[in-house]
C-alpha cells in the first residue's frame, strides 16, 4: 500500500519500480495471510481503513461510498495483476485502467 496517492493522484497507489513492487508483493502476502490468521486483523484492517480514507481524500471526498469501494477493490485487483509471477500486467496498463475507472466513478458521483 502506498501513501503516494495523495501526491500523485489515484495512480500513485500503484507500484512504480522494483522497490515499490517488492513492498506491494509483501503487502499482498500479508493480506493473504490475514485471511486465515486472526492475529493480523488489527494491523491489516487499520491499514486498509487508512488507504480507503486516503483514496477518498485523493478524490476530494466526491465519490459515493459504492464508487469508493469499487475503486478500492479495483486497486487491490490491479496490484495482484501487476505482481503476478507470470505475465504480469504492466504498470502503465494498470494506471490507465485505474485512471479511467476513477474518472468514471467521479462522473457517476457528481
Image (spheres, helix red, strand yellow):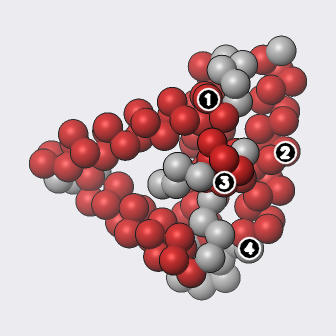
- 51 left or right of 37 in image: right
- Disc 3 secondary structure class: helix
Picture coordinates of residue 96, whole percent (x, y): 83, 56
Establish if 107 lies above or below 9.
Answer: above
| Quadrant of the snapshot with the C terminus | top right
Q: CA distance from mark 2 to mark 4?
A: 16 Å
Closer to us: mark 2 or mark 3?
Answer: 3
Q: CA distance from mark 1 to mark 4?
A: 26 Å
Question: Is residue 70 visible in the rendered structure shown here?
Answer: no
Q: Nearer the viewer, residue 30 or 5?
A: 5
Q: CA distance from mark 4 to mark 3?
A: 15 Å
* Structural crowding at the residue carrying mark 2, measured as other residues with C-alpha within 10 Å and reported as few (<14), some (14–19) or many (≥20): few
Closer to us: mark 2 or mark 1?
Answer: 1
- N-terminal-most mark, 2 or 4: 4
- Disc 2 secondary structure class: helix
Q: Which residue is mark 2?
A: 100
Establish if 95 lies above or below 9.
Answer: below
- N-terminal-most mark, 2 or 1: 1
- Disc 1 secondary structure class: helix
Q: Which residue is mark 1?
A: 57
- The label shown at residue 46 is none
* Structural crowding at the residue carrying mark 3, measured as other residues with C-alpha within 10 Å and reported as few (<14), some (14–19) or many (≥20): some
Q: Which residue is mark 4?
A: 90
Closer to us: mark 1 or mark 4?
Answer: 1
- The quadrant where residue 70 appears: top right
Q: Are marks 2 and 3 in contact (CB under 8 Å)?
A: no
Q: Which residue is mark 3?
A: 12
Question: Is residue 19 visible in the rendered structure shown here?
Answer: yes
- N-terminal-most mark, 1 or 3: 3
- Disc 4 secondary structure class: loop
Residue appearing at x 26%, y 52% in the figure: 34
Amino acid at each position: 500500500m502506498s501513501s503516494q496517492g495523495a501526491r500523485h493522484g489515484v495512480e500513485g497507489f500503484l507500484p512504480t519500480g522494483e522497490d515499490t513492487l517488492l513492498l506491494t508483493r509483501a503487502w499482498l502476502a500479508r493480506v493473504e495471510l490475514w485471511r486465515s490468521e486472526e492475529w493480523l486483523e488489527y494491523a491489516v484492517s487499520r491499514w486498509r481503513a487508512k488507504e480507503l480514507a486516503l483514496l477518498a481524500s485523493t478524490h476530494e471526498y466526491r465519490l459515493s461510498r459504492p464508487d469508493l469501494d469499487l475503486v478500492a477493490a479495483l486497486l487491490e485487483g490491479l496490484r495482484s495483476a501487476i505482481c503476478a509471477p507470470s505475465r504480469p500486467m504492466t504498470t502503465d496498463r494498470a494506471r490507465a485502467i485505474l485512471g479511467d475507472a476513477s474518472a468514471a466513478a467521479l462522473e457517476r458521483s457528481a
